[in-house]
Image (cartoon, rainbow, N blue to C red):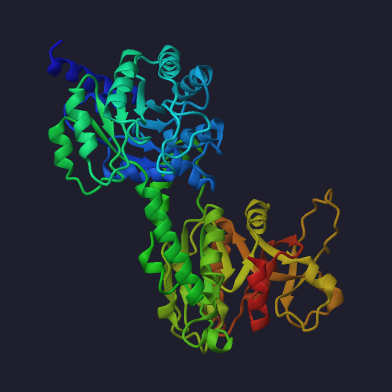
């Protein structure tokens, strides 16, 4: 058959399956390249770089699991990793199958399972199970030629797609058996049905590889791994008629170097300031793993619903000594992330994407991705209600209002979002039970206390919120989190306007605003029992370190 016609046929097939795509790379008249990957993420990076195929290295998969390259990772564990890799990329994968994990019977099962997971091909080497890495020791024992040919035949007989590629790896040169033995074995493996031969060498130059190539005379495609003879120009291999080059382990090695340096720097400096600009962003991770596709799918498959927005009140600077010398307390670092970052993450976990932060003191320090900022430049002389009034235009539709210096578990926000009511406040009943020293400013008086009976689903409503409520009359403390439905947001905006008209907005705080709302509309109390933290003191900062 004319080679150009054959290659055209392979190109057409390559668009259909990963098996055909790998066969096209192996049989192409142009030199092909397979890049090492050892996980779903590294497979994505290989595809992003522009490679057309992946080498799933046994060494790097084992090492990424913290194991040696001596079949310490079982073939089923390797198969699990391969499944993630295959699902993460459209590229074909040639997997390093070591010795086939046993005899012909193990190879049969391995090939069937690889085909089920759309793995394009496998490379097996003519050594004994369990294998030893080729670069360790000298004169490693080789498999009997006839026995290894049986493994090849078993693999080819077990493939469920005609384009599945089986590469036979010849270890004769590595083991010091010489060129004649290497050629004898390669020819036997080709005759047994191998689709390609991988000839391996650990010399620092490509001399014996090129010598083998001249003797081989393209009897079937030839694959090489130039890890040791890396200084040889790639064009030398192209001119020699090599089919495919495998870059065998460099992604894992590069990641080890980067992780060591990053870990050392963070350990030594106890800070992220010298590291953050030199590593991939979190957005980059989201991009690689396809968060945008999930967002599009949510729009297609989930029922339409109004998307809540949030207003974070963070104009106050706080008094935490050196911690707030050049930044407000919402930006104080808690285990590598600021309070505000953690709060924004909690909001985003609940599906809230439009987040507005009202800034004041040290406003230039309040900079985060995925937030909008509003400035209250009169923060020294005004209260929280005025800050909320600065965000008046953002109170449109379902809106969450939250203090910028609180931490709480995700389930608390989920409960507030799911609770029935047009205005819902999260109130900690536990604080009343503990009767801690000092009267919280946001003490809540409600029409019913917390009952503790999970069958009690009667609504509880706010009567008033203030600092002067007697402990016996205060069933809890507002944690600084409220949700307003579309109608509730209208009521909130109207009350802000009323305070402004009465000349009270500048000095009003949130307890006054919520008390006024409760006098006109039902304000539902959603009780929680702890699992939140208001960061006001250095002791609170210490507690926050343990909270996260």
| Image quadrant occupied by the C terminus | bottom right
Q: Is residue 535 left or right of residue 133?
A: right
Residue 516 image-quadrant placement: bottom right
Relative to 250, residue 153 above or below? above
Residue 3 in sight: yes
Count numbered badges in the picture.
0
Q: Is residue 51 left or right of residue 288?
A: left
Residue 256 image-quadrant placement: bottom left
Residue 237 image-quadrant placement: top left
* Residue shown at the point (35%, 35%) measured from the top left: 176
Relative to 188, residue 374 above or below? below
* Residue shown at the point (42%, 51%) measured from the top left: 286
Q: Depth check: 113 or 415 in front?
A: 113
Relative to 324, residue 83 above or below? above
Residue 497 in sight: no
Q: Position of residue 545 (x, y in %)?
A: 63, 71
Q: Position of residue 224 (x, y in %)?
A: 28, 35
Q: Depth check: 331 or 399 in front?
A: 331
| Image quadrant occupied by the N terminus | top left
Q: Position of residue 499 (x, y in %)?
A: 56, 78
Q: Position of residue 348 (x, y in %)?
A: 52, 56
Q: Is residue 153 left or right of residue 507?
A: left
* Residue shown at the point (33%, 21%) measured from the top left: 185
């Amino acid at each position: 058959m004319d080679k150009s016609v054959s290659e055209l046929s392979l190109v057409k097939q390559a668009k259909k399956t990963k098996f055909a795509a790998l066969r096209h790379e192996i049989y192409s008249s142009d030199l092909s390249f397979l890049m090492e990957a050892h996980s779903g993420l590294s497979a994505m990076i290989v595809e992003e770089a522009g490679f057309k195929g992946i080498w799933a290295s046994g060494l790097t998969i084992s090492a990424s699991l913290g194991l040696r390259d001596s079949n310490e990772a079982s073939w089923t564990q390797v198969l699990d990793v391969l499944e993630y890799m295959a699902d993460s990329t459209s590229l074909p994968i040639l997997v390093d199958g070591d010795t086939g994990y046993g005899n012909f019977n193990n190879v049969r099962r391995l090939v069937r399972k690889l085909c089920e997971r759309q793995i394009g091909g496998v490379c097996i080497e003519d050594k004994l199970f369990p294998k030893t890495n080729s670069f360790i020791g000298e004169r490693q024992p080789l498999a009997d030629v006839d026995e290894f040919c049986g493994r090849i035949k078993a693999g080819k007989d077990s493939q469920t797609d005609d384009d599945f590629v089986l590469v036979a790896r010849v270890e004769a040169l590595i083991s010091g058996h010489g060129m004649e033995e290497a050629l004898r074995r390669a020819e036997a493996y080709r005759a047994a049905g191998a689709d390609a031969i991988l000839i391996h060498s650990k010399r620092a130059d490509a001399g014996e590889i090129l010598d083998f190539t001249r003797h081989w005379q393209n009897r079937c495609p030839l694959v090489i791994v130039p890890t040791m003879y890396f200084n040889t120009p790639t064009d030398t291999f192209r001119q020699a008629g090599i089919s495919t080059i495998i870059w065998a382990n460099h992604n894992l090695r590069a990641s080890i170097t980067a992780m060591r340096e990053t870990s050392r720097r963070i350990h030594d400096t106890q800070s992220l300031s010298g590291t953050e600009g030199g590593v991939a962003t979190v957005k980059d991770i989201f991009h690689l793993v396809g968060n945008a596709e999930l967002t599009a799918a949510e729009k297609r498959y989930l029922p339409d619903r109004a998307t809540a927005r949030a207003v974070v009140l963070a104009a106050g600077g706080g008094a935490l000594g050196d911690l707030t010398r050049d930044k407000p307390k919402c930006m104080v670092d808690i285990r590598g992330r600021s309070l505000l970052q953690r709060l924004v993450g909690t909001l985003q976990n609940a599906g809230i994407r439009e987040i507005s932060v009202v800034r004041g003191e040290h406003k230039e320090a309040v900079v985060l991705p995925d937030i909008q900022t509003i400035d209250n430049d009169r923060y020294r002389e005004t209260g929280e209600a005025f800050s909320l009034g600065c965000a008046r235009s953002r109170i449109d539709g379902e809106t969450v209002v939250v203090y910028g210096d609180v931490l709480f578990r995700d389930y608390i926000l989920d409960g507030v979002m799911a609770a029935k009511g047009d205005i819902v406040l999260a109130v900690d009943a536990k604080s009343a039970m503990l009767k801690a020293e000092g009267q919280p400013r946001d003490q809540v008086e409600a029409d019913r206390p917390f009952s503790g009976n999970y069958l009690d689903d009667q609504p509880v409503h706010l009567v008033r919120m203030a600092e002067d409520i007697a402990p016996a009359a205060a069933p809890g403390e507002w944690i600084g989190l409220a949700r307003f439905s579309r109608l509730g947001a209208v009521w909130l905006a109207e009350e802000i306007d009323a305070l402004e008209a009465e000349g009270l907005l500048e000095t009003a705080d949130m307890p006054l605003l919520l008390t006024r709302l409760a006098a006109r509309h039902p304000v539902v109390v959603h009780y929680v029992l702890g699992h939140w933290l208001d960061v006001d003191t250095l002791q609170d900062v210490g507690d926050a370190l343990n909270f996260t």
